[in-house]
Amino acid sequence: MQRIGVFVCHCGTNIAATVDVEAVAEAAKSVPGVVFSADYPYMCSESGQDLVKESVQKYNLTNVVICSCSPRMHEKTFRKAVESIGMNPYMLEIANIREQCSWVHKDKEEGTEKAIMLMKAACAKATLNTPLTPGMLPVTKRALVIGGGIAGMQAALDIAEAGYEVDIVEQKPTIGGKMAQLDKTFPTLDCSSCIVTPKMVDVGQNDKIRILSYSDVEEVKGYIGNFDVKIKRKARYVDEDKCTGCGLCTEKCPMKKVPNEWNLELDTRSCVYIPFAQAVPKVATIDPRYCLKLNKGTCGICSKVCGVGAINYEAKDEIIEEKYGAIVAATGFEIADISRYDEYAYGQSPDVVTSLEYERLMSAAGPFGGHLLRPSDHKEPKKIVFVQCVGSREEESCKGGKEYCSKVCCMYTAKHAILTKDHYPDTDIYVFYIDVRTPGKLFDEFYRRAVEQYGVHYIKGAVGKVTPHKETGKLEVQGYDMILNEQMHIDADMVVLAAAVEPSHTARRMATMLTAPMDNNDFFTEAHAKLRPVESATAGVFLAGMCQGPKDIPETVSQASAAAAKVIGVLAKDQLVGNPCIAHPDELMCNGCSQCAGVCPYGAITYVEKEFRMPNRTTKMRRVAQVNEAVCQGCGACTVTCPSGAMDLRGFSNNEIMAEVDALCL
Amino acid sequence: MQEELIKRAVELMEDGTVNRVLGWQKGQFVYDITPAVFTSADELKENFVYNDFCGDNLSKYLKDETEKEGKVLVFLKPCDTYSFNQLLTEYKIHRENVYAIGIECYGKADVELLRRKGIDGILDVKNENGTLKIATIYGDEEVPMMEAMAERCVNCKSKKHVAYDELIGEDGEVLDSNRFDMVEKLEQMSAQERFDFWQGELSRCIRCNACRNVCPACTCEKCVFDNPDSGLYNKAAADSFEEKMFHIIRAYHVAGRCTDCGECSRVCPEHIPLHLLNRKFIKDYNELYGSFMAGAEVGQVSPMVDFTMDNDAEPSIVQKGGAE
Ligand SMILES: Cc1cc2nc3c(=O)[nH]c(=O)nc-3n(C[C@H](O)[C@H](O)[C@H](O)COP(=O)(O)OP(=O)(O)OC[C@H]3O[C@@H](n4cnc5c(N)ncnc54)[C@H](O)[C@@H]3O)c2cc1C
Ligand code: SF4
Ligand code: SF4
Ligand code: SF4
Ligand code: SF4
């Protein structure tokens, strides 16, 4: 017979204010199986846990029901507590009377009534609980980092530092990400290249790190400790091992009119190319879209000039298969498409640029060698209008913009203004903003410098229209100053749009492969917004950088190092404790229909032909389902699919769930 | 046609292709036919029958038959071939142990419809060019075959055989039938009207389990209704709620797998139009996920149990209107 103990937490006033906790404890006394109940101000505190432990021993409890916050908060805490005194941790149930009750009710009577129902449901389930023992899983002591931006590089370096091998898969020919495209970085204004290229070199030279550039992740199977990953190494038509990066081929290539993505297509490059001088790996890549040899069978010059014979027109995409113990997603961001905002004339005038394009225009490695010139006539702009929040903080219904704040724009716009004023003090600069957000170390000081020291005109308001005038070459900016409540007309030479950032367009595909959750905006979601900010809800998958949400470089780097620490935590173990709450088929009931395999998102289900004893000493071969206990995540999709009820989930069995439902409804 | 089938069956037994035949066996009356396994030419000649009352879908018997030694011959009408495929999809038939002959079908008669016309004491029925000449103890009667045809045959979904090793007679086309008309009528009813309709129908259920036992989709090792641990185990409905639960659960269990073979409605002694439940599911599948016909091909995955990496994550039910 079960001997259940019920413990009701006040959570200070979090629960006690809307739930009569004493009444819940009292009601528990009449629930079948309950032999002890009590309430306590903070169940999770040491003395609260002691109360549970002592009661278990004193009253010989077989099951414990804690009425408290969400199991996501403290299930682990309480399971540990009861385990320490020898009770199987899976004999403990949590009734969530905070998030699902006290926080959503105002009326104490209603709250109390509901809390009692939730307590009864938990007791009903607890009665059917059985002790569970998790299995142990082996660990492949290597990590995969997807994306070679600053996030991916930092994570890889930290993991390598701890002595583990790391592969970085980067879709572009070089690592570096967006940071390598920036000119200077706020708030210290140190040159971006000067801090990022040494990191790239560190990564390139680290013998624990392998860079798989110009590659895509094609398939991810498996689970924490044991991921099986297929990686496509796209054909670069240049042998990475032979190429010395001398660049002779890029000089001699006659196809020079290829839009240069590195400079955001503000200039052109050759068809065989090295994205930029400090690229890592520094090897050439042939762009198959433009190559005369590959498309027409002519030319072939690069192969003739290459001193080491690295060019190979016959190269094919190659799939390699690797095993990893943990994966870091660091797929970064993209600048959102702002072509919908025709009022800003982006796309109508080359002198209306995005902020990232402005970074390139200012950069010494940019299209104009660092001399700030207008793209249209290559003249120095004298009057520049910056528009913030283009596509950010907007209702989606409006123009398909982003509801979120892109976070870095306020600061980089101040940076652009300061840098421009620094080099060209006679430039007139206007910044249209909704509000300026500068919470960060030295951030507000930085912004105030732009206003006070550099005399940048910050205008709270909005730009209604930008009209390019061909004759004068000016951009007529119609704006509105909200503080003075007046219309403004500015004849600008350039307009810079702080376009929203959005997650990499590959993020959804990656998330699907990794079975990692993402939000409506396609940012990866963290396992817990506050307490597990660098972990995905999928075990063994960690998050770093912009792919998880807008953030600047320092935040990206901190998150990357934190993710690395988590990865190291996984790889340092020889075995991992599995999750015992997984599916298992009752082979005597399974009819082999194979519907369950279809719904399993993790591919955990396979089938075997097995011999079964039948009446009269006969046997029969039958097809039955099998669950790979290490792969199953316990999602339960298969259990609801199985028509015979053969598939069941340990710890959440059909009967346990039905008992809960009955307790609530009957 | 009966003679042709017997001749071919005997040939296949004699040349060793098969060692037995799954077919229809004469009963006491012309309309009471039972599925049977024949193991010799003599048995076939004596008892094998193929007439207007051979509605039984033989495919489900293959689950047990193909587990035995040697190959079994089976005759499949077009609609039966869908069940055959669905059973193959669910690994219920050992394909190598069966030789399937597709046979043409122009619809089967339902003796109940004759009885409703007041025709009783039937001694013999002959189909002469679409007219049933019926001899009864009270004298002779004539009924056009169309008027005696089972509902599922009037609204036949397909004259095409989707699986066979050999064909006797013509192969037809998938038909654009009116089989969802009645479902539409039900959909147009108010919730209360619809509830009353089903209450009226399902309250007659005597839980004989014939519908389940005949259903080619109901091939579980242990049916939930026979499993004391399932919480659904009962032999007779205790109240009107349980009456409905049995049928709703069964409809869900066969959803996406039911080929609309119509056997459930055919065998129900209470004449409950069970096919309407299944057709509602089929109609919804078609509307929500694009046309889907269980059993059309072997290996098809029903939309409800399909998970692929490029699945459209949008909640399509909401998007497309779905339920009210
Ligand atoms: C205009 C502008 C100015 C900025 N200025 C500053 C500043 O001054 N100071 C500051 O702190 N921050 C600044 N930022 C923010 C800074 O750029 C980001 O914080 C930082 O680049 C984020 O790094 P990341 O590695 O997360 O992403 P990214 O830099 O985007 O790197 C992601 C990498 O992953 C690769 N990748 C993507 N998908 C895949 C895939 N499926 N497979 C393989 N590889 C993939 C990409 O090719 C890329 O190399 C600025 C941002 C912008 C837009
Ligand atoms: S519970 Fe079932 S569907 Fe979910 S992961 Fe496990 S085996 Fe797959
Ligand atoms: S769905 Fe159920 S019966 Fe079918 S194979 Fe899976 S466990 Fe077996
Ligand atoms: S539910 Fe009825 S129509 Fe559907 S497969 Fe079963 S017997 Fe045939
Ligand atoms: S065949 Fe008819 S009476 Fe029998 S269980 Fe099915 S619905 Fe009920």
Image (cartoon, coloured by chain):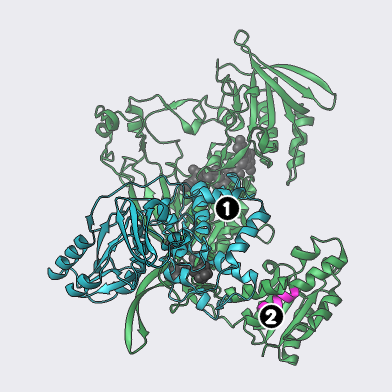
Chain colours: A green, B cyan
Label 2 or label 1, whichever lies nearer to me, is: 2
Q: Nearer the viewer, residue A408 or A361?
A: A408
Could you tell whether A368 is left or right of A117 in the image? Answer: left
Region rendered in magenta: A119-125
Q: Position of residue A310 (x, y in %)?
A: 28, 41
Q: Quadrant of residue A341?
A: top right
Q: Quadrant of the N terminus of chain A?
A: bottom right
Q: In the image, what residue occupies the spot 64% across and 17% down?
A: A493
Q: Which residue is mark 1?
A: A544
Q: In the image, is the residue at mark 1 within 8 Å of ligand 1 by its beta carbon?
A: yes
Q: Secondary structure at mark 2?
A: helix
Q: Position of residue A435 (x, y in %)?
A: 77, 35
Q: Position of residue A642 (x, y in %)?
A: 49, 68
Taking the image as four quarters, which one is ligand 3 found in? bottom left
Q: Secondary structure at mark 1?
A: loop
Residue occupying the far top of the picture: A471
Can residue A504 be found in the magenta stretch? no
Q: Chain of mark 2?
A: A
Magenta span main SS: helix
Q: Chain of mark 1?
A: A
B104, above or below A498, in the image: below
Q: Evaluate if marks 2 and 1 touch, with contact meaning CB atoms under 8 Å apart.
A: no
A436, above or below A645, in the image: above
Could you tell whether A46 is left or right of A228 in the image? Answer: right
Q: Which residue is mark 2?
A: A81
Q: Amino acid at mark 1?
A: Ala
Q: In the image, what residue occupies the spot 24% across and 27% down?
A: A298
- For label 2, the crowd category at 10 Å Cα-Cα, with few meaning under 14, some 14 to 19 and many 20 or more, is some
Q: In the image, what residue occupies the spot 72% across and 71% down?
A: A664
Q: Quadrant of residue A618?
A: bottom left
